[in-house]
Image (cartoon, rainbow, N blue to C red):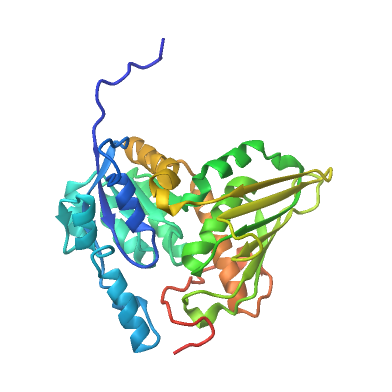
Amino acid sequence: MPEKSIPVSARIIRVGVVGTGPFSFYGTFNHVINNIFRDYNYFNMRITHIWGDDYSKNYKGSPEYVKKMLGFWNDEDHSPQGLAKKCGIPNVCKDFHDMVEEVDAALIMDFDRAYELAEPFLKRGLPIFICSPVAVSVPECEKILDLAEANGAAVFTGSYSQSLFQNVLLYDRIKRDNLAAFFTSTSFSFYTCYAPDGLDPVYRLIGPGVRKVALHGWNGSAGYDPTGIPVSRINLEYEPRGNNPPIQGVLTLGGFKKTTEWFRVYYQDHSVIESVTNTNWSKCERTLRDFLLDIQEVFVTNKSLETRSDILNKLKVLIAAYKSACEGNRPVLVSEVGDYRLPTTRIEKWDVIP
């Protein structure tokens, strides 16, 4: 017999989407959660409110490029109004504060304003998801987590890629006490959107303990996040585990394997395991299902599936890699990150600063 009685029905969690900007996967989340694909919806949550900012400040570059990008984010497939119509979202808010009293949880999708957008929901003790990366800097992330802890609100973060089925199978197979080195690659475009797609699964695969990071192949573009950067790699060195030497790892951004994720892991005994993960965005309801079910669990229980340390560790590595790119590709200690900020404004070309 089950320890708890099986519920006759489940309450539908009302979710607000806060941000529809160029740094998130908000569009596909809406499509899958509200299920535009078939009559049956297996989620116990629905997006009931949506708000988007004026994203003109998110782009620099040629007038033609800026016009093109603003047209993209304001069209019928990407604007709050267009998504509301397409996904059956009944409320388009002029101000994100307007939804705070009417939702049970929130998806915070614009990391460049994460604390400001999350604050009113956390003050009410509501659980939130923040699209990876969680914030522009460690101090801002700490403010979010402090406020969440003070009000008993769960914070869950990350990239959908960490919950892809093939990756989860690899996590279960890995022998973390015997690791020596690893090579991995991920598909790539923008740094802030796509680097977490590789780093978040690496964190779940290898675990915490990165002490030194270097990014090679890109110069950091003087604080901008341009449309595409060169094929690059992030070198990761970990704290020693037991009597073994430090684990050495490489994440290639946009190179070697043209798949969503690829891993090759070497053990101290010289044995090797390898895994390949592909993403099919034409079937995005399958691609995002497991990750969105994790988010749903957090929203229903108001308990996060990751710790404060998990969230901060992932952000520090991402920022350390960016700091390395901006400082001549030198190795950067994770302890050096301080209040260093991620790039938040996109330009047309990675090597041309307007």
Q: Quadrant of the N terminus?
A: top left
Left or right for 273, reference 144:
right
Front-most of residues 127 and 86 = 86
Taking 21 as reference, is 16 above or below it? above
Front-most of residues 200 and 287 = 287
Q: Position of residue 313 (x, y in %)?
A: 56, 55
Q: Quadrant of residue 96?
A: bottom left
So how many labels did they put on this image? 0
Q: Position of residue 10 (x, y in %)?
A: 26, 29
Left or right for 352, reference 336:
left
Q: Position of residue 333 (x, y in %)?
A: 65, 66
Front-most of residues 15 and 263 = 263
Residue 221 in sight in this render: yes
Q: Quadrant of the C terminus?
A: bottom left
Left or right for 316, reference 133:
right
Q: Quadrant of residue 321?
A: bottom right
Left or right for 98, reference 307:
left
Residue 207 in sight in this render: no
Q: Quadrant of residue 268?
A: top right
Q: Residue at x 35, y 40 (%)?
A: 296
Q: Position of residue 284 (x, y in %)?
A: 40, 49
Q: Residue furthest top?
A: 1
Q: Residue at x 70, y 51 (%)?
A: 264
Q: Residue at x 64, y 63 (%)?
A: 252
